[in-house]
Image (cartoon, grey):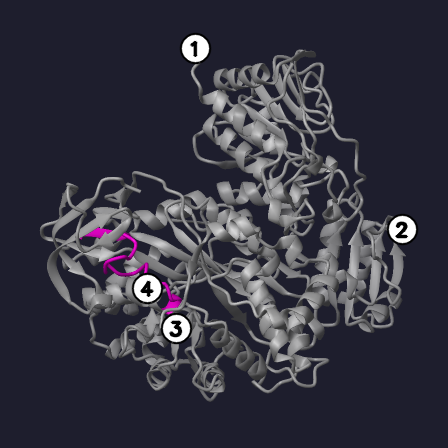
Amino acid sequence: MNSRPLLIQGGKVIDPISHAGIVERDVLVHEGKIVATLPDGLSPEVINATGMLVMPAGVDMHTHIASTGVNLARQMQSGVTFAGQPLVPSTFDTGRLYSAMGYTTAIEAAVSPSDARMAHLQLEDTPNLDSGILTLIDNNETLIELIEKKDYPAARAFVAQMLHCTGALGMKVVNPAGVASWRRDPACSQIQTLDQLIPGCSYVTPRRILQTLTQISEDLNLPHPTHIHGNRLGEPGNAQILMESIRAMEGRRAHIAHLQFYGYGATKKGQYTSAAQELCAFLEAHPNVTADVGMVMFGDAFTITADTPLEYGLWQRTGSVARPAVFIESECEAGVGVMPASYDRTNRVHSLQWAIGLELLLLAKNPWQICLSIDHPNGGSFLHYPTIIAMLMNKALRDEALAKAHPWARKHSSLAQIDREMTLEEIAIITRAAPARMLGIDAIKGSLMPDTDADLTICTFASEDSDTLFRVPDMVIRGGTLIAKCGKVVQELPGRRLRAKITVFQDDLKASEHRSVSDRSICPTQFGLTTGEIAQMRQITRKH
Amino acid sequence: MSSPLQPSEDWQQDLACILGGVPLQAQVRPRAFVMGSPVAWEDAVTQAGDLLRQSTRPAMLGLHTLTIESLRVIVTLAREHQGCLLPRPFLDSPLRLTQPITLTATLGHLLHCPLLLGIGVKASQLPYHLPAKDQRFERLPDSLEMVLELRQALKAGHEDHPFIRLLSQQPRTGVLLGWWCEERVASQWHRLAADLQHRTRMAVVSLPDPEALNFKGVEAVIAWQTACSIATGGVSFFSGKPVSCSPWDVMLTQHRPGVVVDTSRTTTDFRGLGLEETRVIRIASSMDPTAAVSFVVPDLAIGTRGRVMRFDGQVLWLCADPSQGQPDLTTLLLQEIYDASRRTRV
């Protein structure tokens, strides 16, 4: 933290959370925070930002930068690079690259409980980024058994215990009931309906898991609602089951991960079409739900997912002979599949996926409801963000790219007909303010209001080159300290990890403790973070 | 001689995470030696720091005896001195690179498989709790010919083959490979598991070599800190950036190190490798009289405080009470050596 206060003078400030539009004003920083005034007698260091844009730093709410799956990808990626970097960079380079691009917060979106310690160690080695993890919970056999017994208090206590001892910012649901069904029955590779029973259960279905976990999220008062990777990801016509899942939540808060992968309608022959318009209209009618888009970009990617049946099926369909892949199932609690991938503009499905991502962001009337993500490295590297932003702000660029893509994308999406060009303020919403708000961390991130963290980017604006604007900001400040200048990291600071304040229901704990400790070869006392480690993390409380 | 790092009773801890296979050993008193003679701990640290500062391309060997915390320091040491990391196994099988798929599971998964196949493994060699009373255990030979024959029978659709009939009746099957199994055998069993996934969920797990200790941790820490795989044998920082390398590249060609930091339990014969001039800083549970500097510290088998990776890559606590975590002695020592190597001699 810079001990001397900072005065960022004369910049055009974009701070969507303050609802002020773009205004020319000074920004004051003291002790790592934005402040309204300085204590008497302190003279600040002045940064002349006249004519420059001053924004909160970027927040990537759904990325994969620290877990067993990510680490396997690092080991498997031999020679796969993007922009001169390994596609899945080391933890150190991940922090450097994000921060050089103006991002200072990133959330690892899928960590199995027994993986949590390693994920935190990796995040500790990721400089310049504040970070957090979402703990995988829904296919955990203990939880499934508790739901089967209709023992809601024990299920709630179990989830609370797992989130607490893994230091999680929130809970992640992946293909609810799907992974457990696949685990229990090799012939069950995919969930067909929300009311399909898990083999061996007479009560537990995807619907009941979603209802239970969204209710637990409300009861625990989590800052970030249940983060959902739904059923049938990537399949034609899957927008229907996603909408049914949202209805099943009955108005409770939820966040849909990588929405693009559910943005598919189907032709009569079962081929992919875009369902972006229908999904956007549906989300508008369901303000309890937010989403990150999960763009895909042409080129190399690495698929890393806890949806092991999906990944296994994908591996079988797309090159099981030539492609290396790893599938891990951990202690009947969660798993991961890892496989290299490539999005090809001559492939009609890949082209349509790319188009749907842009459609969803451009068709959403409320930019606070769908934010930008690429699900790094599933949709490609996070270093694609500036290019995506440039396309959102410039129809001509989009049209040029669409012309090079497979004609299927033009025919089966509405992208060519969309004239909207996003404004800078809208970009600031989908890359900064909205993801911070969705995560429940907007009291400290994604804003330049007093008392928020002094994480900001300062850049020279040239309207014709928004790619450079967001790729190489003039200055990136984190916690009041200059960390990057013109795309070069000038200082590496340790990041802080963010975790939710968890209300543990003491009275409900007995049953869940007994189950988790006695019946598993892993248990919180073996993999959980220490009290000291938990205390060092920054605790996030839900804002009302 | 004095030791600034006093051992405590906490060193003797349970080691349940190593599948219960590593016996507890007697507590080791930390000591330091230079060319076999006892010296003060601080002097040995200074000497080790000097050696590293003056060296070009130092090599870090062993590593599997270290905790995650120690590994994080030793990777930093290699990076700062543009050295290399050559974890055990010292000269690895190149066949590791050709394995196309790994379908694996953990002990917890195996505990729920009704059928267990031990490939070259006797029941007496199984980890604790296996086989459970409701589990059937069958021993099969660890031969390449046999697994190839099974794959062939499966491919040809010989449903009456006794093995295929047996597997088709099982929803889940655990396959336990001995750590001595040849890589080609392991690879073929993984392939067979992939072929069979729609009939039975087959989990293929190589039993950990009791001597492998924290090798999974080595793989993980090096991967996250360098984005490189150690499948080729190691990672070097010779050009400033980490790249995968082979021990042959490092030890026997133009990159031969003048200094190695060796944490292996057994002494490496550097003369046998044609590296007579190599000076060794040895950090192990026994004294090495041939090393330039030798530190005697408890290693993982002795129950240092810290954490290790479970055999499937998960991290577990070594100490019984996770609320009391603190760095182990080796981590502190490596940090001291690192600091000493950055100091200018007065």
Q: Mark 1 lies on which chain?
A: B
In the picture of the structure, the residue carrying the numbered disc 3 is A291
User: In front here: B299 or A386?
Assistant: B299
- The residue type indicated by label 1 comes to Val
Instruction: Give the Cα separation between the discs numbered 3 and 2.
Output: 52 Å
- The residue type indicated by label 2 comes to Lys
Instruction: Give the Cα separation between the discs numbered 1 and 4.
Output: 51 Å
Mark yes or no: residue A492 visible. yes
User: In front here: A47 or A267?
Assistant: A47
Nearer to us of marks 3 and 4 is: 4
In the picture of the structure, the residue carrying the numbered disc 1 is B346
Q: Which chain carries label 3?
A: A
Nearer to us of marks 1 and 3 is: 1
- The residue type indicated by label 3 comes to Ala
Of callouts 3 and 4, the N-terminal one = 3
- Dot 1 crowding, Cα within 10 Å, few <14, some 14–19, many 20+: few
Q: Magenta segment, principal secondary structure?
A: loop
Instruction: Locate the C terminus of chain B by quadrant.
Output: top left
For residue A445, above or below residue A275: above
Q: Is residue A440 magenta?
A: yes
Instruction: Locate the N terminus of chain B by quadrant.
Output: top right
Instruction: Give the Cα separation between the discs numbered 3 and 4.
Output: 16 Å
- The residue type indicated by label 4 comes to Asp
* Start-end of magenta stretch: A438-459
Q: Which chain carries label 2?
A: B
Question: Given contact means CB atoms under 8 Å apart, are the residues at marks 1 and 4 in contact?
Answer: no
Residue at 14% over, 64% down: A22
Would residue A164 appear left or right of A526 to someone viewing this image? left
Nearer to us of marks 3 and 2 is: 3
Would residue B262 appear left or right of A77 to someone viewing this image? right
Q: Residue A350 appears at what percent x and percent y? A: 42, 69
In the rendered image, the residue lying farthest to the front is: A40
